[in-house]
Image (tube, grey):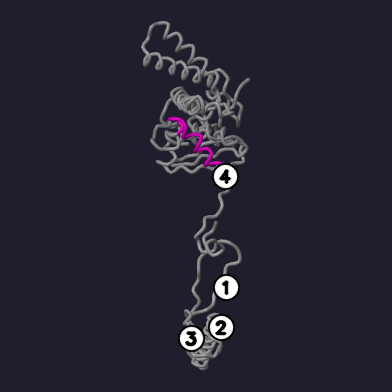
Amino acid sequence: MAQSTHVRAEPGDHDHSAAHTRTESPHPPAGPGLSQELDLVSLQRLVGNQQVARSIARRRGLGNARTPMRLVQRHPGPTIASPAGKGLFSKLFGGEKAPKTDAQKKMDEIKSILGKSDAGKAALKVLDKYKVPVDLEHPGPGSVYQGPAPGKILIEATNGAEDAAFILVHEANHAKASNEGKTADVSALARDVYVKTMINEETDSTVNSILAKLGMSTANQAKITATPVMEERYKTAFDEALKAAKTAKKGSREAQKLAKAAGWKTINEAFYDGSLVTSNTGETYAVYYGSFWDSVNNPPAPVI
C-alpha cells in the first residue's frame, strides 16, 4: 500500500499569558482642601499608633492601658489588602509564569524524544540556528515546511508527539536546505535535474526521520510506538547490505557505509515506484515536481 509523507502547500515552498502592567496613580493636584485632607490622614495615623501601643500595653500586663509609652510607628502610605489566594500578587505582577499550553507541552515532549538521537538533535539545532517556528496546531491536510527562508514548519494537529517528532525531523531538513540555499531552483534547472534534485532532498529528509528513531539506544527505541515513514523498508535494505558486507569480509566502517547507502537507495526508489505519494494530490513525487516545473517554465497559454 502506498504511504503518504508530508504535504507541500506548493512544490516551491521548498524555497520552500499576557504580561500585566502596573499603572501608577497620578499625584493629587494641589488645591483647596488638600492640607486639611493631609492633616486628617496624619491624625488617623496618630490614633492608630496609639491604639497599637495600648494593645501592646495590655499584653505586657501594664494594667493601665492609657499609660504613656513610646509609640509604634507604622509605615506611611495606603493600606494594601492581603492577596486573596496563594500567589495572586505574583501572578498579577509577573512573578509566576502562566501555565503551558497543550502545544507547548507537546513541543517539550517532542524535544525530549529527539534529544535521544544524533539525527533528532541535529534537527533541533536547525530550528534554533535559523529561528524556524513550528506550528503544532496546523489543521492540515498534511504537514509542510513553508518557505521562503527562514520559513516555518506546519505539523498537522492530529499527530501525536512521537509522529510529530519524526515529521519535524523530515521538515527540518527542508528548512536547512532552504536556509542554506541548497534547494533546487525550479527556474534555473532543466526539468529532469530539478525533479531528481528535489527527490534527493525528499530522500534525505525521510532517511533523517528514520535515523532519528534508529539512532536511539535499544531501550529508548522500545519506548517509541510510532513508526517513521518507510522505516521497515530502510531497515530491511540496511540489514541485508550489512550482512553481505560482512560476508565479503569488509571492515566495520566500510560495512556500515555500504549498509547506509543501500538504505538511502531503497528510500529514493520509493519516491519513483509509487510507494510514496503526496498526501495532498496522491501523485508520485516525480509527477508532482515535474508538474510544478511545467507550471513555472511552460505555463499554459492564457484563455482568450
Q: Position of residue 258 (x, y in %)?
A: 41, 14
The residue beneath circle 3 is 29
Which residue is drawn at the image coordinates 55% and 44% (left, top)?
A: 105
- Which of the two discs, 1 and 4, labels the residue nearer the N terminus? 1
Q: Position of residue 65 (x, y in %)?
A: 56, 88
Q: Residues within 10 Å of mark 2 (few under 14, many from 20)?
A: few
Task: Name the foreground residue: 287 vs 302.
Answer: 287
Residue 81 badge: 1
Q: Position of residue 191 (x, y in %)?
A: 46, 25
Q: Main secondary structure of the magenta part?
A: helix
| Callout in the foreground (2, 3) | 2
- Which of the two discs, 1 and 3, labels the residue nearer the N terminus? 3
Q: Quadrant of the N terminus?
A: top right
Contact flag, marks 1 and 3 (Cβ < 8 Å): no
- Which of the two discs, 1 and 2, labels the residue nearer the N terminus? 2
Amino acid residing under circle 2: Arg
Q: Position of residue 101 (x, y in %)?
A: 57, 48
The residue beneath circle 2 is 58
Q: Residues within 10 Å of mark 3 (few under 14, many from 20)?
A: few
Which residue is drawn at the image coordinates 49% and 11% (left, top)?
A: 240
| Callout in the foreground (1, 3) | 1
Whole-angstrom CA distance, mark 2 to mark 3, is 42 Å
* Magenta-highlighted residues: 104-120
Task: Name the foreground residue: 16 vs 77.
Answer: 77
The residue beneath circle 4 is 103
- Which of the two discs, 2 and 4, labels the residue nearer the N terminus? 2
Question: Which quadrant of the view contains residue 302?
Answer: top right
- Which of the two discs, 2 and 3, labels the residue nearer the N terminus? 3
Whole-angstrom CA distance, mark 1 to mark 3, is 26 Å
Contact flag, marks 1 and 2 (Cβ < 8 Å): no
Q: Is residue 91 above or below residue 60?
A: above
Amino acid residing under circle 1: Ala
